[in-house]
Amino acid sequence: MAIQYDDIRPDHRIILEWVDPNASVLDLGCGSGELLSLLIKEKGARGHGIEISVEEIYKCIAKGLNVLHGDIENGLADYRDQSFDYVVLNQSLQQILRVEPVLKDALRVGKKVIVGFPNFAYYRCRLQILFKGKTPVNAALPYQWYETPNLHFLTILDFIEYCRKQNITIERRVFLGTARRVHLFPNAFAQTGIFLISSAGGD
């Protein structure tokens, strides 16, 4: 059964647009393999994943995906430099304890890296903190404070500044609201930021 475009998650649509046909892809923190499966079916990608949750790995295996059980914070020493066309960190960056070494390793292993994360500076988050005095809960940050897997609550501007300081090239960027792309003041009005980045010394 063909996948309907409207059924694809907005962030997955962007990544699907960015990944070249028949590219090699390593999805770090691939979860149940929804994105990886989509890239393989729609783009003919040679896809691999790494996931720490055994329960999610079983879901990947049921989809016929090539996924390894592992903690991406332990590094990617088994992978050669630029051994993948793309490394994906979608909705997993904010859940990593040590962001810098993971990003550095991703940029070494991948010719390009795709990063997507919830924007904590989204205006509804700000309003919930201002008026309710409570940790925000919304579509991009759906967890209560006591059950959230998120360790870092970064913003779009935080990530852009980080890339500038680390001499990381931002090749493309898209900002998503609740129903469409955001073009004006994304740090306030976007729920999610998605970036295509590469090492300044890469191809």
Image (tube, rainbow, N blue to C red):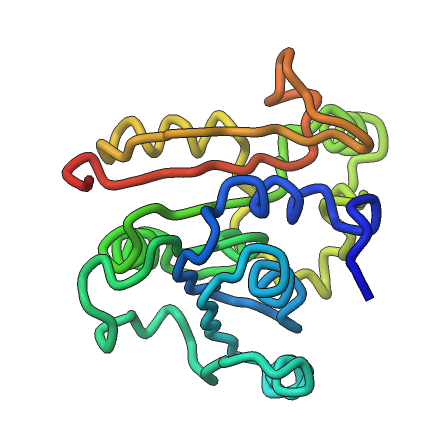
Residue 73: x and y, percent? Answer: 37, 69
| Viewer-side residue, 40 vs 122 | 40
Q: Above or below — where is 67 with respect to 193?
A: below
The quarter holding residue 77 reads bottom left
| Above or below, comparing residue 153 to residue 92 in the picture | above
Residue sitting nearer the eye, 4 or 83:
4
Indicate left or right for 49 with 146 as reference. left
Image quadrant holding the C terminus, namely top left
Residue at the spot x=76%, y=50% of the render?
8
Q: Where, quadrant-wise, is the N terminus in this rendering?
A: bottom right
Residue 79 in the figure: left or right of residue 4: left
Residue at the spot x=50%, y=40% of the render?
18
How far across and down, in percent of the image, does residue 88 sit?
46, 55
Q: Is residue 60 above or below residue 185?
A: below
Q: Residue at x 82, y 31 (%)?
A: 179
Asked if residue 183 lies left or right of residue 173, the reply is right
Count the numbered circles shown. Answer: 0
Along the viewing direction, whichever of 84 and 76 lies nearer the viewer: 84
